[in-house]
Image (spheres, rainbow, N blue to C red):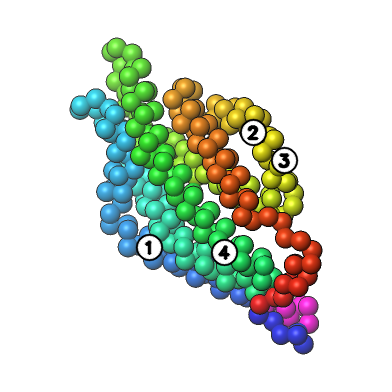
């Protein structure tokens, strides 16, 4: 970081240099993991496709309507897997860049929030993969009309899976958002408690918009949203907004 006698321009340039260094380290980490996983790209895609393949009738397969689909789609899945594997290192680089500019009380809150955000996002993805996908794929297959064979394109399947991963991963971040809102003084804990009925209605509206048009998948998103909202209310009790005197006495940058 910059010293006290550096000019604002020199400080800005030093920050840019450090940011570039952190970004390069993150990109290199993702690429290294990707190269290590690339030989297993077919197996990784088969793992992602397993929920649908188990739901399809015996003998049914997926198809590739694009000439390059059989090559590019497994690589896309592998790149996503590489990013997830390297995510702790990427987040560490982000933390190392921003931490020196934070006050001590902000550092004590930021690191646990970053870790919990990653854990909750992974939990959301796992919930979608192990719980939601088997249910909704069996539901879709059960409604296949007689004489019609369900043959999903692998690229469209990947798009659907990624969208569901992002939707459920983001949904599981609700407790972190609540903690931040209370900690920053934007919303009080009592105010969040009083909004329960609106949150329940909003959860079902959001679930109806971002999930497939079936009741099962909508419930599987709306119900966790309501439960996570309650978990966030409990967590927010342990991270109240600090009073001004405490902040003034503790606001020392590392």
The quadrant in which the C terminus is found is bottom right
**Residue 196: which numbered mark, if any?**
2
For the point 53% across and 53% down, which residue is it?
A: 117
Q: In which quarter of the view is residue 141 placed?
A: top left
For the point 34% across and 43% down, which residue is it?
A: 48
Looking at the rendering, the stretch of residues picked out in magenta corresponds to 7-15
For the point 44% across and 57% down, which residue is it?
A: 83
Q: Is residue 40 above or below residue 90?
A: above
Label 1 vs 2, first from the N-terminus: 1
- Closer to viewer: mark 3 or mark 4: 3
The span from disc 4 to disc 1 (Cα, nearest Å) is: 24 Å
Judging by the rendered image, the residue that carries numbered circle 3 is: 191
Can residue 154 be seen by looking at this rendering? yes
Label 3 vs 4, first from the N-terminus: 4
Judging by the rendered image, the residue that carries numbered circle 1 is: 33
- Closer to viewer: mark 1 or mark 2: 2
């Amino acid at each position: 970081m910059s010293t006290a006698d550096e000019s604002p321009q020199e400080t800005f340039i030093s920050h840019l240099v450090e940011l570039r260094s952190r970004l390069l380290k993150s990109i290199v980490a993702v690429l290294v993991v990707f190269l290590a996983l690339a030989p297993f790209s077919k197996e990784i895609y088969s793992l992602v496709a397993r929920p649908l393949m188990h739901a399809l009738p015996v003998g049914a397969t997926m198809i590739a309507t694009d000439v390059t689909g059989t090559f590019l789609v497994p690589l896309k899945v592998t790149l996503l897997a590489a990013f997830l594997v390297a995510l702790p290192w990427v987040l560490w680089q982000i933390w190392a860049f921003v931490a020196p500019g934070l006050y001590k009380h902000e550092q004590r809150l930021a690191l646990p929030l970053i870790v919990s955000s990653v854990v909750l996002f992974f939990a959301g993805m796992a919930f979608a993969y192990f719980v939601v996908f088997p249910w909704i794929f069996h539901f879709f297959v059960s409604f296949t009309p007689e004489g019609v064979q369900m043959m999903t394109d692998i690229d469209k399947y990947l798009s659907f899976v990624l969208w569901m991963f992002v939707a459920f991963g983001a949904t599981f971040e609700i407790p972190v958002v609540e903690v931040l809102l209370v900690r920053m003084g934007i919303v009080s804990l009592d105010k969040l408690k009083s909004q329960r009925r609106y949150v329940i209605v909003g959860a079902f509206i959001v679930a109806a918009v971002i999930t497939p048009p079936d009741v099962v998948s909508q419930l599987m998103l709306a119900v966790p949203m309501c439960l996570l909202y309650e978990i966030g209310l409990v967590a927010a009790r342990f991270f109240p907004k600090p009073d001004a005197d405490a902040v003034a006495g503790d606001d020392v940058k590392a």
